């Protein structure tokens, strides 16, 4: 058995215990630097200057909460320890190693001082060092010159979306990785257009740059998983000249845990998680998949939501139905992410309708305008129902499926009104396709091709409609996954 003590120079309790440790010949390691340690030894009149715990290697290994920490080691393995001043315990542990400590003048008990490993900055550095040594972090380091501004350096190296990003230091990445049980080198998916392998670590790096809260990482991982699903057709979404981009809808209790907004200004500014989760996904597409605006991303106009758009569903007592993810197969009690390729949202105003049929008639008018009323069956859409409109459906007892069915029927138009040249509009159906001008042609391929979510502030008889990109087999299908596997 042998004894090892950990101390630091600015700890008054260490000052009290050190003379007894020095007199007994106990090996002492200092968490302080050489000059601070030598000055402490001179001040206390020690016969031996404590050794230095270089890079806090020993302190990180045993990780005490407080110093002085007296460790009893058996072949290098810890057999017992005492932290702080506990006179009787110190004497007893020392006796097990055959050492007598003269502690007679010391008080029976006094709390120690926080170990340097508990300093947040030091703890973050040690966590990053362990992550690198253990193969949890393998990404190459980007060197930024001493005279460079790190924000400008990241922009100049093409790693941003045009806005400043948070420098992804090893400390920040390691801290974020603590919020998933998955190994950092687990593959989340292969990202289009250049099939970049998105590991958990690489997603975490981009989530740090996006400014995500650490605990939001599982949601970002689920969103990346969904984007890499071949049904979502990420490559096509990037290559199209259409302005659509991925929209992340989070349904379930974890959204609240990470502070996502599902109420007022749900699609706007002011909430960190909402603003950064979608941005993290887009940075993964850029930095891992290689999809860059003006090159691989060929959008003619784009839209602000392509920086990143994510929101949480409002699933409180006002909700007229279950969460979108739960309706699409995620078990109750779990949180799900639904990813859909959508254009920018537009408001639908109806401040008069108090019956579900009339409200659906108003909502259908806006849905007709997706892309253009003349294009049929080629686009899906998402309807984001606000709480005051949602109340109409809730009080009438209408399910989400009934709303979808009603809207599907109300967005049918006589074929004669859709042919090219009708009402002077060149766009439309080829005349030879129309054998019966009175035949109704649907806007959407099926009721479930119109996704219906619920969120927003209490005041305002508003809902929002997002037009989709090319639908189904010819384009992109919505993908829903559970966040649970990434937690």
Image (tube, rainbow, N blue to C red):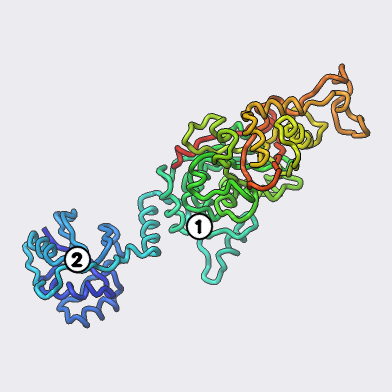
Q: Is residue 195 above or below residue 445?
A: below
Front position in the image: 24 or 376: 376
For disc 2, the marked residue is 5
**Splitting the image into 4 quarters, where does residue 228 fall?**
top right
Q: Where in the figure is residue 342, as x and y percent of width and height?
A: 68, 40
Q: Where in the figure is residue 38, as x and y percent of width and height?
A: 25, 79
Q: Where in the figure is residue 259, as x and y percent of width and height?
A: 52, 50
**Left or right for 404, reference 121:** right
For disc 1, the marked residue is 168
Q: Is residue 294 above or below residue 123?
A: above
Q: Are marks 1 and 2 in contact (CB under 8 Å)?
A: no
**Left or right for 88, reference 178:** left
Q: Residues within 10 Å of mark 1 (few under 14, many from 20)?
A: many
Q: Where in the figure is residue 336, as x and y percent of width and height?
A: 52, 37
Which residue is depicted at the point 18% across and 75% down?
16
Q: Is residue 68 above or below residue 353?
A: below
Q: Residues within 10 Å of mark 2 (few under 14, many from 20)?
A: many
Residue that protrudes farthest toward the right in the picture = 424
The numbered mark, 1 or 2, whose residue comes first in the sequence reads: 2
Q: Secondary structure at mark 1?
A: loop
Residue 317: image tag: none
Which residue is depicted at the point 64% across and 34% down?
452
**Left or right for 76, reference 132:** left
Front position in the image: 311 or 155: 311
Q: CA distance from mark 1 to mark 2?
A: 36 Å
Front position in the image: 359 or 136: 359
Q: Secondary structure at mark 2?
A: strand
Front position in the image: 374 or 41: 374
Which residue is depicted at the point 47% across and 45% down?
200
Q: Is residue 190 visible?
A: no
């Amino acid at each position: 058995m042998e004894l090892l003590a950990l101390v630091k120079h600015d700890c008054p309790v260490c000052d009290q215990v050190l003379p007894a440790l020095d007199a007994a010949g106990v090996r002492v390691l200092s968490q302080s630097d050489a000059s601070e340690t030598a000055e402490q030894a001179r001040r206390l009149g020690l016969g031996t200057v404590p050794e230095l715990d270089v890079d806090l290697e020993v302190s990180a290994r045993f990780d005490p909460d407080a110093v002085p920490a007296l460790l009893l080691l058996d072949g290098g393995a810890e057999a017992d320890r005492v932290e702080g001043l506990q006179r009787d315990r110190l004497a007893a542990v020392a006796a097990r190693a055959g050492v007598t400590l003269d502690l007679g003048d010391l008080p029976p008990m006094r709390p120690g001082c926080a170990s340097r490993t508990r300093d947040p900055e030091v703890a973050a550095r040690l966590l990053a060092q362990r992550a690198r040594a253990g193969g949890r972090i393998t990404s190459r380091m980007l060197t930024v010159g001493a005279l460079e501004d790190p924000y400008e350096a990241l922009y100049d190296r093409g790693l941003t979306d045009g806005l400043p990003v948070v420098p992804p230091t090893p400390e920040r990445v390691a801290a974020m990785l603590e919020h998933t049980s998955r190994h950092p080198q687990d593959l989340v998916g292969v990202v289009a257009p250049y099939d970049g392998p998105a590991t958990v670590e690489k997603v975490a790096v981009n989530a740090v740059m996006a400014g995500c809260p650490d605990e939001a990482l599982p949601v970002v991982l689920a969103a990346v998983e969904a984007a890499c699903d071949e049904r979502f057709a990420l490559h096509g979404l990037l290559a199209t000249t259409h302005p659509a981009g991925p929209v992340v809808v989070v349904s379930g209790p974890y959204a609240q845990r990470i502070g996502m907004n599902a109420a007022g200004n749900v699609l706007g500014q002011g909430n960190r998680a909402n603003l950064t989760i979608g941005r993290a996904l887009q940075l993964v597409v850029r930095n891992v998949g290689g999809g860059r605006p003006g090159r691989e991303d060929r959008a003619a106009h784009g839209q602000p939501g392509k920086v990143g758009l994510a929101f949480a569903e409002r699933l409180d007592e006002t909700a007229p139905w279950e969460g979108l993810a739960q309706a699409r197969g995620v078990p109750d009690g779990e949180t799900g992410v639904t990813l859909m390729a959508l254009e920018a949202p537009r408001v639908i105003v109806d401040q008069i309708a108090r019956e579900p049929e009339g409200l659906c008639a108003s909502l259908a008018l806006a849905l007709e305008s997706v892309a253009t009323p003349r294009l049929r069956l080629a686009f899906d859409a998402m309807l984001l129902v606000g709480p005051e409109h949602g109340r109409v459906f809730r009080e009438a007892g209408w399910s989400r499926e009934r709303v979808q069915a009603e809207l599907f029927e109300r967005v049918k138009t006589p074929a004669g009104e859709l042919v090219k040249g009708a009402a002077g509009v060149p766009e439309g159906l080829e005349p030879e396709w129309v054998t019966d001008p009175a035949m109704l042609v649907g806007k959407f391929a099926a009721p479930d091709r119109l996704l219906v979510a619920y969120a927003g502030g209490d005041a305002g008889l508003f809902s929002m409609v997002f037009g989709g990109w090319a639908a189904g087999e010819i384009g992109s299908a919505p993908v829903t996954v559970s966040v649970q596997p990434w937690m």
